Amino acid sequence: MRSRLLPTVGAAALTAALALSGCAANESGPDPSSTPSDTSGDSTAESPQTDPTDDGGAAVSLSGTLNGGGASSQGPAQEAWRAGFSGLNPGVTVNYDPTGSGDGRKAFSEGGLAFAGSDSAFGPDEIAAGGFGSCADGSGLIEVPVYISPIAVGFNLPGVDSLNLDAATVASIFTGQITAWNDPAIVEQNDGTDLPDLAITAVHRADSSGTTANFTDYLDQASGGVWTEGSVEDWPDSLQGEAAESTSGVAETIVGTEGAIGYLDASRAAGAMGTAAIKVGENYVSYSPAAAAAAVGGSTFQSDRSAGDVVVDIDRTIDSGEVYPLILISYLIGCETYADPSQGALVKGYLEYVASPEGQAEAAANAGSAPITGDPNVEPKVAAAIASIQ
Amino acid sequence: MAPGGSLRGGNKNGERAGDRAARSIATAAGATILVALAGVGIFLLARGLPALRAGEGDLPDGATNFWQLAGPLAFGSIWAAALALLFAVPVAVAVALFITMYAPRRFAGPLGAIVDLLAAIPSVVYGLWGLMVFAPLTAGLYGWLGDRVGWFPLFAGKTSATGRTILTAALVLAIMVLPIIASVCREVFIQTPTLSVEAALALGATRWEMIRMAVFPFARSGIVSGAMLGLGRALGETMAVAMVLSPTPFLMTFRLLNSTNPNTIAASIAQNFPEAYGMEVNALIGLGLLLFAITFAVNYLARRVVARAHPGG
């Protein structure tokens, strides 16, 4: 009789185990807030010193630990930057925790991180309210667009590698108004392509995502009113369609389903599926790093911000040239003036590297991003913003 | 006398020390479980309660109150887990019967070990397999079902072309909970009193009649508690569901074959936590509290069922 009690005891243990693991996962978010004191302690002890033997570009050799985190879109690029920067500055350890943009902004506000990566910048009123943990009293913020990545519209149609689609057609597909691949709206833009009578499965992100925010922003600006849901991080509930978890989930779902279409970071679509060329003016433009960078160069900067707060208003309706306006811009966010000057020096050194030609080339090689260097509109503003960090 | 006495005294002392150590270790282990459980409960209450009181504007996705957010997710969790049990319990019972009653002894041991091995596969691997292999496989079957029996309410609506439906998620969950149910059943079936088995066979019962007359009545509570253990795992499963299912927020439907499915609590927490801040974090922890309560209720029910079948233990 005794042994039959075992299952119930096991059940209680299982409950506890499940609950425990859930707890651990939940607590990992706020945890970084415990690190800043260690960090500042470290770097005060080994504050930046001039090293006369240093014959590199930088006159100052840095040491200490720099903690950052946020946007997962920057994850692969941050890996490349950290490796490259540590190679140049062996005394510095840079950490980047890709927990998500919202989490990164929150941890930076609370002072847990020295810098944050985020797919959306802080609003001017949030900056005016101040109270950022790592910054000196009254300091503003530095926000620089250092990671620009094209978003591809990828699809799975056997034998078709590229399609021409305008924004209104893409919007109609994702709102469910166009349901078959041989719909006249698609056929008339693709002379000579044999489009099957196959149902369209439109795949969107199940989790909230900067990719969704930028894709819906593109549809909102460029679809001429077909898209009515605005620019949102979470896919609108009212729209039907297939949802998949994370970029990898979207990619796998498209690859596994004939007739599927979805939006995802271009580096993940390359070679795995067909991609759409989107209509810009009278031409159809395929994604490329150069065309994505041109979209930033052709955009304006938000004017209600300080000189170091370089936030781009992406113009998705640019109508000429080899421009791909369906892009994601991810920012690095730091303080104008750090409460701990040694942290300021570290952040400044790191961001200088990130924005440098080498740093941008590393990210392009590792993450398929578009370099901001060489753009006369963007590069000087970013360089000036980083130079002002104290 | 003296040597014997000292020997006995030494033994006694040794037993006493061992007893004490065993008792304190066991007590500490028991207390640790309670403390951990209480700690988790307090954390969930403290961080989750603000969301239960929050109104429109504070909650994510424009929900007007917590229950509007939580209701469909709780429904999705229970619906997916119930479907999983529906598939898993008959198969698990059959597997356990085969191992204990039908299989030649040489196969029984290895087969049991193989079933247990299923439990050792990480859920993220089940998720990958479900997403990349199983869902595309089922898509064809679902298309056929949707065309032929689309009039049946459960199969109504536009059939998913990807196979990433709640039915697929429930089937993956069923495979995941199968080993735990099967091994509990196996343990219980083995303990069927030999006298009852032999009596049934002596009365001229066939093997199947013997199982119905002697094994099942004896094992009923064991099967139920095994199923409840499986239900607990299915309710809490996160990664496999998050990867396989194509969810739609605020949706409650019994339909099995659509691209739009109710999400589960655990998968929703995993999907939304990384980008959550402010009240959304509280709302997600509140969802965790709700899942905790549901799991607790399930385990309590299982205990009741077992206790009723065997009053007084």
Image: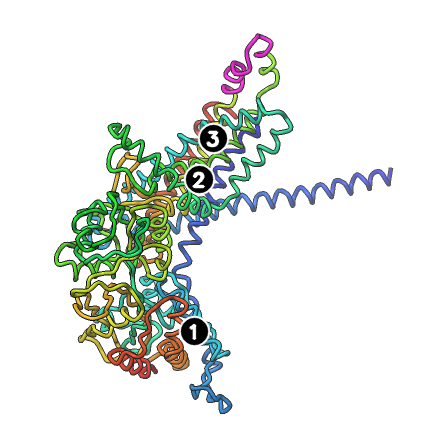
Residue underneath mark 3: B225
Q: Nearer the viewer, residue B298 or B122?
A: B122
Question: What's the magenta region?
Answer: B200-217
Task: Kindly identify which chain the residue marked by label 3 belongs to.
Answer: B
Task: Kindly identify which chain the residue marked by label 1 belongs to.
Answer: A
Residue A145 — which label? Answer: none
Three-letter code for the amino acid on which mark 1 is drawn: Leu
Q: In this view, does B274 lie to the left or right of A92?
A: left
Report the residue at 25% width, 56% height from top: A163
Specify the quadrant that holds the C terminus of chain A. Answer: bottom left
Q: Can residue B69 be seen in this view?
A: no
Q: How far apart are marks 3 and 1 (CA)?
A: 52 Å
Q: Is residue B240 left or right of residue B179?
A: left
Image vertical order of residue B156 relative to residue A97, above or below: above
Specify the quadrant that holds the N terminus of chain A. Answer: top right
Q: Nearer the viewer, residue B238 or B222?
A: B238
Residue A254 x/y as whole percent: 33, 50
Residue A21 x/y as whole percent: 45, 49
Residue underneath mark 1: A66
Density class for disc 3 (Cα within 10 Å; few <14, some 14-19, many ≥20) is many
Q: Do labels 2 and 3 share a chain?
A: yes
- B62 falls in the magenta region: no
Of callouts 2 and 3, the N-terminal one: 3
Residue at the bottom extreme of this rendering:
A52
Density class for disc 2 (Cα within 10 Å; few <14, some 14-19, many ≥20) is many
- Magenta highlight: main SS: helix
